[in-house]
Amino acid sequence: MTRDFARAELEPAVIEELVSLASRAPSAGKTQGWHIVGLLGDDTERFWSAAMDPDVRTGFAFPGLFNASFVGVVVADPQAYVDRYSEPDKQRTGLGAGTEAWDTPYWTVDASMATMTFLHAAEDRGLGALFFAVAHPARVRDALAIPHGMQLIGALAVGVRAAGSRPGRSADRPRRSSQEIIRWGRW
């Protein structure tokens, strides 16, 4: 994850290419009920102004984050899944009855898989990228006119990595081994 970006421009086509690759992520019923509200260049300030109070920004540990060429808010549309699973080929599942019929909210799962695919695509293209929580979600929702029925998944920052950028505080934390993660046969 990159937290320090150089000031550089990205063409919309670059982001559209990343989104196109992300659209190939798994999706329940091929619903693809996720969207990205994207901002490029100077327009990213709309996000930062809504998400961060000026006093927090002034002392922020990663000021190079504000140089990201692109900021996007990933949102999931639960109603798209209810609608899709109301269609004849999925109707028998009962998942078209409403969001409460879903044990697992696949709108969140699918948006998350697409986000990860987007991040990998950015890395493969040689760009720096970061996924992070949306601070002040109500203000961000209002600033970007995101409908209230949409679930905010998180935000993406993409751009050219700054030379000599430092890793985040958790970067040195060891990863769990596969033996610590997998439970063979039962918990």
Image (spheres, rainbow, N blue to C red):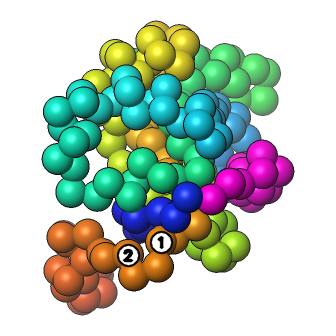
Residue found at x 68% / y 38%: 32
- Identify the main secondary structure in magenta: helix
* Res. 37 image quadrant: top right
Q: What element carries label 2?
A: loop
User: In the image, which residues are magenta?
Assistant: 8-22
For this orientation, the residue located farthest to the right is: 13
Q: Inspect the image, locate mark 1, and give the three-letter code of the amino acid beneath it.
A: Ala
Return the residue at label 1: 162
Foreground pick, 18 / 29: 18
- The Cα atoms of the two marked residues, 1 and 2, are separated by 5 Å
Say above or below: 98 vs 177.
above
Q: Position of residue 23 (x, y in %)?
A: 73, 49
Type of residue at label 2?
A: Ser
Q: Residue at coordinates 28% horizontally, 58% vertically from top-left?
A: 62
Which residue is labeled 2 in the image?
A: 165
Q: Which of 101 and 58 is in front in this view?
A: 58
Q: Residue at x 28, y 25 (%)?
A: 136
